[in-house]
Image: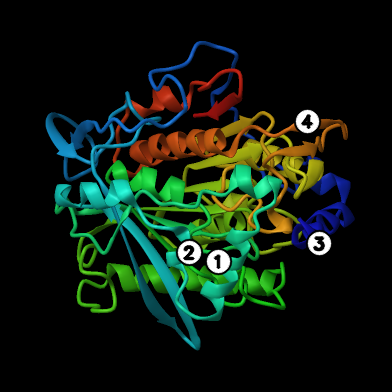
Amino acid sequence: MRRFASLTLLLAACSTAAATSGPGDGAGGTDGSDSSISSTTSGEPPGPGGSSAATDTPTTGVGTTEGGTLDPNATTTGQGSEDDYDAPGGAPVGNATFSVVAGDRTLLVEAWYPADISAQAAADAGHPIAEFVPVGPQRDMMVALLAKLSEHGQVGVREQTRSARDAASAGTGPYPLVMFSHCHGCVRFSMFTIAEHLASHGFVVVAPDHAGNTLFDEPQAPLDEAFLQVRVADQSAVLDAVLDAGNSAVPEAIRGAIDPARIGAMGHSYGAATAGRLAQEDDRIVAALPIAAPVQNPIFSGTKLAEIDEPQLFVLAAEDNSIGKIGNQLIESNFDAAATPAYLVRLKDVGHWGPTDICGLAEQFDAGCGPGARQTDGTEFVYLEPLQARAIVAAYAAAFFDHHLRGNAAALEFLQTATPPEVVEVETRL
């Protein structure tokens, strides 16, 4: 949490008007038209997804046509239907690590993808998350952190994957791709639960370490406009590499298997700001999902919601002690000012790191798992279990990208439904 105190202070130091601005002012307003439809859903019966808790029951989803529209006559292993976003999809998950050279930067990259059914047993067994880290001092540091998890970490850290290393592809591509950007001082696998969920539903997820701004870097790269541009350049360089069917550095399982017309961006915290800027600057991005941070805010002056035409789904953690009240106010104003369609998913009793797999891995990641103090009124409480927070965000991510990358109109019902209603509030502008 110490690392994010700087963000809270920076936001607080900016003008109050920037924090509370709505459409048409400093938040990047709309053209003033009243053509959007607004709806709020809270406390209603769960939608077709039912409970948000993930299960181990594989499903076979509904296939899509080449253009991304729903094909009711096709069934494709690993593609989720409108009925099962809260459950794993039908494909076992493979994952692989590779490197991409981006100018003078070498980026370690992780990919998750639908694997061949022969990988099911290996995916069920998974592997310890320490194996994401190359052997050497960084692996030693990761092992040491895992060996002394605090009360928060014992609740929040997911130590075992559900993916098969270097498994063969399911071979059902070309696949839609989601680019993921990690938080400040985090790692490319900080949301691997959500990546695995998407991969089981037929998506490829690719995530680079932003060198100089990972858990293993000290001092950290700054939270500023200049390094945001570096992070966005990292994402674009990795995207270039993944779309190059002749690039032998890219794992064979995804090489030449990505649909260049179906690419989304997703990120957490600093990564949320990165995903938003990537959508603004890279025409290949067709939908963006920022988690627990505003896209446009006074820190990153180059991000303009008025220049982001793509659909966005904003995730707001109501008890976010890292970005604070002003950060959440900015997320609200981002939603109000965003181009339509836009979605806002508010999560009750969830903190900044709650949807991640590294909540409590180190002291700075404690806010979001175990006991804490409400950012709303300072009272003591217990955060929503990260297991459930991760499952909720994963379900909405699967529905959002199914709708906007695959063209599955049926996914809209899930996106407009609070699931589960006691935790989630949904607002949409269509």
Q: Earlier in the sequence, mark 2 or mark 4?
A: 2
Precedes in sequence: disc 4 or disc 3: 3
- Residue in the image at 55% along x and 66% along y: 143
State left or right for residue 283 relative to residue 420.
left
Which residue is nearer to you in this view: 273 or 398? Answer: 398
Q: Earlier in the sequence, mark 1 or mark 3?
A: 3
Q: Position of residue 413 (x, y in %)?
A: 40, 22
Residue 362 percent location from the top left of the image: 68, 59
Residue 381 — which label? 4
> What residue sits right under mark 3 in the picture?
6
Q: Are marks 2 and 1 in contact (CB under 8 Å)?
A: yes
Amino acid under label 3?
Ser
Q: Nearer the viewer, mark 2 or mark 4?
A: 2
Q: Please determine whether, in this image, residue 420 is positioned above or below residue 2.
A: above
Q: Secondary structure at mark 2?
A: helix
User: Mark 1 to mark 4: distance in Å?
Assistant: 30 Å
